[in-house]
Image (cartoon, rainbow, N blue to C red):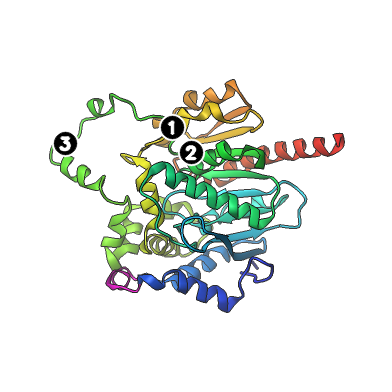
Amino acid sequence: MAAEATTGTTTFDKSASSSSDSSLCAKDKSWSSWWTGTSFDMLRTLEKRILSYLKTPYRGSFVDVGHCVGEADKVWTLSLNTESPNVPLVLVHGLGAGVALWVMNLDALAKDRPVYAIDVLGFGRSSRPRFSSDPMVVEKQLVKSIEEWRREMNLKEIILLGHSMGGFIAASYALSYPDRLRHLILADPWGMPEKPKDFESNVRIRFWLKPIFAVSKMLNPLWPIRLAGPYGPSLVSRFRQDIVMKFSSVITDGMDISNYIHQCNSQNPTGEGAFHAMMQDFAWAKNPIINRIGEMKSTVPVTILYGSKSWLLHTSPPDTVKQLGENSFVSVKIIEGSGHHIYADDADAFNQMVNEACRAADRVQNEGKLTD
């Protein structure tokens, strides 16, 4: 049975883990937390309930990454199969998610290698510091938090996998720290292309919706979840039933997923605010990766996975990211029938493709040992 372990230099014991959760939201004891039903203890309980379906033992810990954004930021981390000598895989989730949503992937991915799943700073159980409002500064803060996390975990090289917003962060990390990456895996990545100049003229929006969209652009994307207060879980279950149903083959109680997503996003939304600072009309980034992709070191192999039914396949077509191939190895693969959440839509196909990319990284590592 998987469990939250407590040993190691970067972990907290169970009592400290609980108190650390509480301290992370100590400043949020307000009417808003009362209205939304915010509870780090409940978030912890729901995470553990979902992860109880894992067959692989895991270790949960807060990793102190120091002064990345706040005074002493901590990144919540799941660690699996850490004794394996193979190149470790690090999972970075997308907007509004958390480590528990990898529940259908962790067993398969950790079978032959160490796997680490982190709550991005500002999300899940990680610290929720106030980020800069400057999009490039925010991006550098998030990248720095991952690099400091890697240093604290004493990982020489990693395979970095990012989904959606996590893909944007992972790609930015690859630009800054290419020598730390054995392979970069972008799963339906957000923030790759520029917003088309003719987008507004080609998309017809009913006149009465335009003011709503204009106001929404000024707010954090997931504000309805917090506005709904105690009805937040029901809102998630009703309007994102598609996400909840993706886990139905594993999670017997679907409300666990709804409640988990609600708890992840009813906390102080500093990470969501960071995304808002980086985004342009939600679908695009203010500083898209494609404008900087030529700077990526050719030694970083890249695997990009898309869902055939994903909305990002239209805003970020494969032909755009294939421009990477001019300087380095790039493999673009499509998971048929999957939408944006490809890690859950067809977990078996996703896990297989990720493991193939990881095995390629292992071969490079073994070849390097033979030539040393």
Q: Percent x, y for residue 112? A: 73, 50
Q: Percent x, y for residue 207? A: 13, 37
Q: Percent x, y for residue 255? A: 41, 64
Residue named by callout 3: 206
Please name the amino acid that badge 2 sits on.
Answer: Asp
* Magenta: main secondary structure: helix
Magenta-drawn stretch contains 287 = no
Residue named by callout 1: 313
- Picture quarter with the C terminus: top right
Residue named by callout 2: 188
Q: Quick one: 320 or 347, which is closer to the camera?
A: 320
Mark 3 and mark 1: Cα distance apart in space: 25 Å
Q: Earlier in the sequence, mark 2 or mark 3?
A: 2
Q: Residues within 10 Å of mark 2 (few under 14, many from 20)?
A: many
Residue at the spot x=58%, y=44% of the render? 161
- Picture quarter with the N terminus: bottom right
Residue at the spot x=36%, y=41% of the render? 279
Magenta-tinted stretch: 29-37
Left or right side of 102 for 235: left
Q: Residues within 10 Å of mark 3 (few under 14, many from 20)?
A: few
Quadrant assignment, res 266: bottom left
Residue 301 has which mark? none
Mark 2 and mark 1: Cα distance apart in space: 8 Å
